[in-house]
Amino acid sequence: MSDRELLISGNWKMNHTHFDAIQFVQTLAALLRANPLRAGRALSVHPSFTALRSVQTALESDGVPVSLGAQNCHEAEKGAFTGEVSAEMLAKLNVSYVIVGHSERRQLFGETDEAVRAKVDAVCRHSMTPILCVGETLEEREAGQAHAKVSQQLEAALKGRSRAAVADLVVAYEPIWAIGTGLTASSDDAEKMAAHIRNEIEQLSGSEASSSVRVQYGGSVTPESAGELLRCQDVDGLLVGGASLKAESLYEIARAR
């Protein structure tokens, strides 16, 4: 485990109405009041767009030590993009983190590396932190192409950016074969890829950026698997899907050691 702050992010995906979200925050707030997270750990929750304002109000009114996150944004500032949400709209709700390039967005909605880069641009323009998702399919892993695929995604999103901008990013390694399948990469697999990500960032942006960037692991994380993953030297947090839908479960993951 490194000295970098660990960030545990709960990605709710298309779950929870705004009523559900308020109840979730109330439960999580009570847990954190009773037993706060130890120093060096941070939490973010990423509701659907319809619940963002409700969660913002619930977090801020009670001073809950949890950052508000979003699951996606459009790359344009504004315009005729029916059904889309801009980075500026998120920033006005005090969103801190925006997930960009999640494997479901890439696979189900056809997001390209170019689109992902443009979204990172938009998030950074509005002083929020992108959680840039990278990861390989099972076929790519079995063919020995996992590192090459992740390197390609990192280069497409980060090449040419300032060292300071890259240093402030969060990169989430989420092997596509482990998303929602119940399969989890071993801690050894997670550590090797996290170290590879850090090495790739050093090549792109230098050692200072590489040592500062936070690398999360995502992929069917549970309270039972969280501790071993968080003990990895180059893993600085977790991007949690299904297990983040219950406040108690997300809280257990954030406390895992």
Image (cartoon, rainbow, N blue to C red):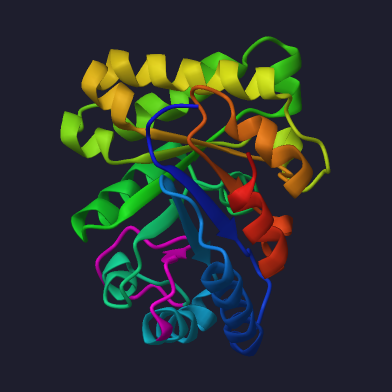
Q: Which residue appears at 48% of the width and 24% of the height? A: 234
Indicate the position of residue 203 as horizontal and vertical percent values: 30, 13
> Up-down: is 125 above or below 202?
below
Q: Identify the residue at horizontal 48%, vertical 17% (top origin).
A: 195
Q: Is residue 79 visible?
A: no
Spot occupied by residue 162 in the image (x, y as percentages of width and height) = 16, 32
Would you say 151 lies left or right of 176 here?
left
Q: Nearer the viewer, residue 22 or 16?
A: 22
Q: Is residue 65 above or below residue 16?
A: above
Determine if the magenta segment contains residue 81.
yes
Residue at 50% x, 76% y is: 49
Is 166 situated above or below 58?
Answer: above
Query: Which residue range is magenta in the image?
Result: 62-82
Horizontal and vertical percent for residue 189? 67, 19
- Which quadrant holds residue 117? top left
Extreme residue toward the right, this view: 182
Magenta highlight on residue 127:
no
Furthest-top residue in this view: 144
